[in-house]
Image (cartoon, grey):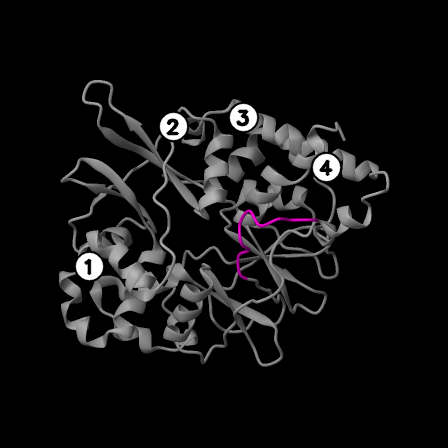
Amino acid sequence: MSDSAGVGGSRPAGDPRHASHTNTSSPRPNHDQHPTFVAPSDLLRPRVSQRRASKAAAQLSPADVEQLEALRAIRGFLKLRRSYDVLPLSYRLIVLDTALLIKKSLNILTQNAIVSAPLWDSKTSAFAGLLTTSDYLNVIQYYWQNPDALAAIDQFRLSSLREVEKAIGVTPIETISINPLRTLYEACRKMLETRARRIPLVDVDDETQREWVVSVITQYRILKFIAVNVTKETQSLKVPLRDLNVGTYSGVASAKMDTSVMDVIHMLVKKNCSSVPILNDDGTVINVFEAVDVIALIKGGVYDELNLTVGEALLKRAEEFSGIYTCTLNDRLDTIFDTIRKSRVHRFVIIDEDSKLKGILTLSDILEYILLEGLENDESGV
């Protein structure tokens, strides 16, 4: 599947009103724009907004009421649209057999410029989950813990990925899917409940009664679908982030340019996150190392470059890297949805007025807020 990507707008100095895009394809510090990061938050944990808690016995402001009404309208829209509706008119789908060697799977992903693919078990003729960058990180972690087994890595097959998860003690990512005719709201709820960032659409053939993979929809595609089709409602989300308690602001792993890539991989696996902010000596975020950056280092099945520093590894990043998207606590979801509509973005680095790290707003955070905020007030008609 391909998406059209726009150019992220920059924010004038001192103007915190709009989400912005910082191009940091080079690992060298950019002294004009300073991003900030936070690890993704746990999904579906009980959320009580600080703003809501302090106003529990008070009447909601007009802005609060408008925000809640917009959220209800967006949820209503998701309940009326099918998961299939998110797909573009033309797209490409690559499905990998679980019997495939991991080295070959890596080559297929890099050659096709994709970071995930559905898995298929040819023995049972059934959908077998989704291959993502997290799986490659788990494999790297496994061989780091078991260096004697590294010589046999070329014989490692995708069917052994679940065994690797058990061996290194990480929580297995649930194998979820949804029928393309089910509502988009159901798909979103499934993604939140299972901490998945994407969900395969799997149908059943009427004649053979066997499963077949239709496509995969991602959080980004869903949020962009919302931004494009319910613009009026997203433009009504005018309460600033500082009053929403959305995003993660503590327990954030960070690194520096001279940190080893393996140390960052350990952070990604331990925190179950997809990125780590890179700070300079005074705490300013100058770049971000993403899980997908690891793929560029191990393509071809060569794992020697994992010994590089973060700075050296980022020099190998593809030129088409879209950059780092930033916002402040004064930003609102209306401007953030506008950025999602225009550009391919997977997270926003939240910065303060000194461009220091405050937090990260992930697509998971936004989707969780859209689906869950204000549900307790729906029956009361607030």
The amino acid beneath tag 1 is Lys
The disc, 2 or 4, on the residue closer to the chain's N-terminal end is: 4
Measured in 3D between alpha carbons, the distance from the residue under mark 2 to the one under mark 3, in whole angstroms, is 13 Å
The disc, 2 or 3, on the residue closer to the chain's N-terminal end is: 3
Instruction: Tell whether label 4 touches label 1 (CB within 8 Å).
Output: no
Q: Can the viewer see residue 318 in this picture?
A: no
Which numbered circle lies on residue 67? 4
Q: Residues within 10 Å of mark 4 (few under 14, many from 20)?
A: many
Measured in 3D between alpha carbons, the distance from the residue under mark 1 to the one under mark 4, in whole angstroms, is 48 Å
Please report the bounds of the magenta region as a residue range: 39-48
The disc, 3 or 1, on the residue closer to the chain's N-terminal end is: 3
The disc, 1 or 2, on the residue closer to the chain's N-terminal end is: 1
Residue carrying label 3: 79
Instruction: Give the left or right position of residue 272, taking residue 375 as reference.
Output: left
The amino acid beneath tag 2 is Pro
Instruction: Tell whether label 3 touches label 4 (CB within 8 Å).
Output: no
* Image quadrant occupied by the C terminus: top right
Which numbered circle lies on residue 141? none
Measured in 3D between alpha carbons, the distance from the residue under mark 2 to the one under mark 4, in whole angstroms, is 30 Å
Residue carrying label 2: 180
Measured in 3D between alpha carbons, the distance from the residue under mark 4 to the one under mark 3, in whole angstroms, is 19 Å
Kindly identify the residue that appears in the image at 60 percent across and 26 percent down.
76
The disc, 4 or 3, on the residue closer to the chain's N-terminal end is: 4
* Image quadrant occupied by the N terminus: top left
